[in-house]
Image (cartoon, rainbow, N blue to C red):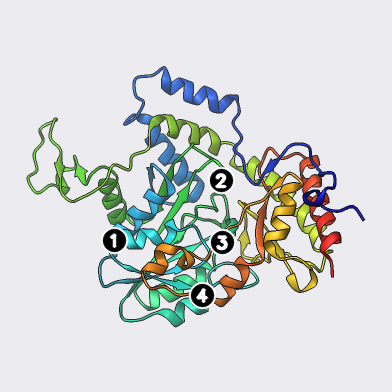
Amino acid sequence: MEKPALYGGIPVREKPLSYGKQYIDEDDIRAVTEVLRGDFLTGGPYVAELERKLCKITGAKYAVAVSNGTAALHLAALAAGFGPGDEVIVSSITFAASSNCVLYCGATPVFADIRPDTCNIDPGQIEKLITPATKGVIAVDFTGQAVEQDEIRRICEEHNLVFIEDAAHAIGTKYKGRPVGSMADMTTFSFHPVKTVTSGEGGAITTNDEKLYRKLMRLRTHGITRNQSEMVHPTDAGWYNEQVELGFNYRITDIQAALLTSQLDKLDVFSARRAQIVKRYDRAFSEMPELVVQREIPESETTRHLYILRLNLEKLTCDRREFFDALHAENIYAQVHYLPVYWHSYYEKLGYEKGLCPCAEKFYGEVMSIPLFYAMTDNDAEDVICAVKKLIAYYRR
């Protein structure tokens, strides 16, 4: 039997295939060029146009575009009023920003375990972790699949908690036919280049609450307002603005806004292509008992950001690291999403210990994300499948 390329065999591919990659077309380039030839590179009309488009796509009443997804989370946590003495329940399998935003406010992240089948936060675990100090929940739409909105909303309303949905992976996803971005108290998005649509760097917060919207708009720009109703010393002087609270410079540029507005025109096409690749992968991998295919709740109509390959290690002679390295040797460049957040050394220094979320920790040891992006060809997808099959055959018990 031919061995994996790591051990001297011939790789499936000649050139590496990344797990994610942006797609930029001439319309995107034209949109950016128009800004560069115009009067405003930042602080101009394209940001407002982007925010209107985000409202249309998500069904939210208000959208605030910001510099990146972490800024979106930080502002949402501030607008929620999280502070010292508060606890906020957070997903355990996510990028660190989902809980770092709680720390930025002086509050304490409390990590909830995931459901082993869907890999999303377990509502039952949320309920068990609520204490008198609990102020909110930050639930992550991992891989793009919607969290269990109805159940999480019920829990938050019953305990008077702020519900922030971290939808960094989930632009375009729907829950029971409603777009993600229109249901939580606040929903945050990221538009990094590996996401479904991109502005290079960029993020946004959507909400249906006007009071939250006004606060987010101030916090985005140093806590400064030109709205007389928000001022301590109001005046109608055209030059006057007033800092009424401590905010940040989290503005997005018109260059980024124009790019993202153009990208959003392709969201349905991007989503459909990703779904085709997911279907192809599911069909191939569901036949292999050595792999566990991620299950999705029926309520989620998912625009998939990541495809998770999960190993059934009891049926393999390798561990995840060995399989991962062998896949890279086949020029299939996988990635791992994610280390349980509280395993990071910074969180260890804060006193978090291993063992908090057993399902998340088991999941971490078994998974990797394989290539999934719009510009992948059918041949690219088949190369991934071929490489995985090759390694499964070699490592099968």
Kind of residue at badge 4: Pro
Residue type at numbered disc 2:
Lys
Q: Secondary structure at mark 1?
A: loop
Where is residue 152 drawn, in percent x and y?
A: 47, 71
Look at label 3 and name its amino acid: Ala
In the image, 84: left or right of 64? left
Q: Residue tagged by mark 4? A: 123
* Residue under pointer 2: 195
Q: Which numbered disc flags the more N-terminal residue, 3 or 2?
A: 3
**Can see residue 388?**
yes
How many angstroms separate mark 3 from mark 2 (CA)?
Answer: 16 Å
Question: Closer to the observer: label 3 or label 1?
Answer: 1
User: Mark 3 to mark 4: distance in Å?
Assistant: 13 Å
Q: Quadrant of residue 242?
A: top left
Q: Which mark is residue 293?
A: none
Residue 72 location in percent, x, y? 38, 50
Q: Is residue 95 above or below residue 134?
A: above
Q: Is residue 34 above or below residue 375?
A: above
* Residue 61 visible here: no
Q: CA–CA distance between discs 3 and 1?
A: 26 Å
Counting residues from the start of the chain, the first of labels 3 and 1 encountered is: 1
N-term mark: 1 or 4: 1
Q: Which residue is mark 1?
A: 105
At label 1, counting other C-alpha atoms closer than 10 Å, the crowd grade (few under 14, some 14-19, many 20 or more) is some
Image coordinates for residue 30, horizontal then vertical, percent? 53, 22
Query: Which circle, 4 or 2, is nearer the viewer?
Result: 2
Spatial distance from mark 1 to mark 2, Cα to Cα? 27 Å
User: Residue 146, labelled with which disc?
Assistant: 3
The 10 Å Cα crowd at callout 4, few under 14, some 14 to 19, many 20 or more, is many
Q: Position of residue 151 (x, y in %)?
A: 50, 73
Residue found at the very far top of the displayed protein: 37
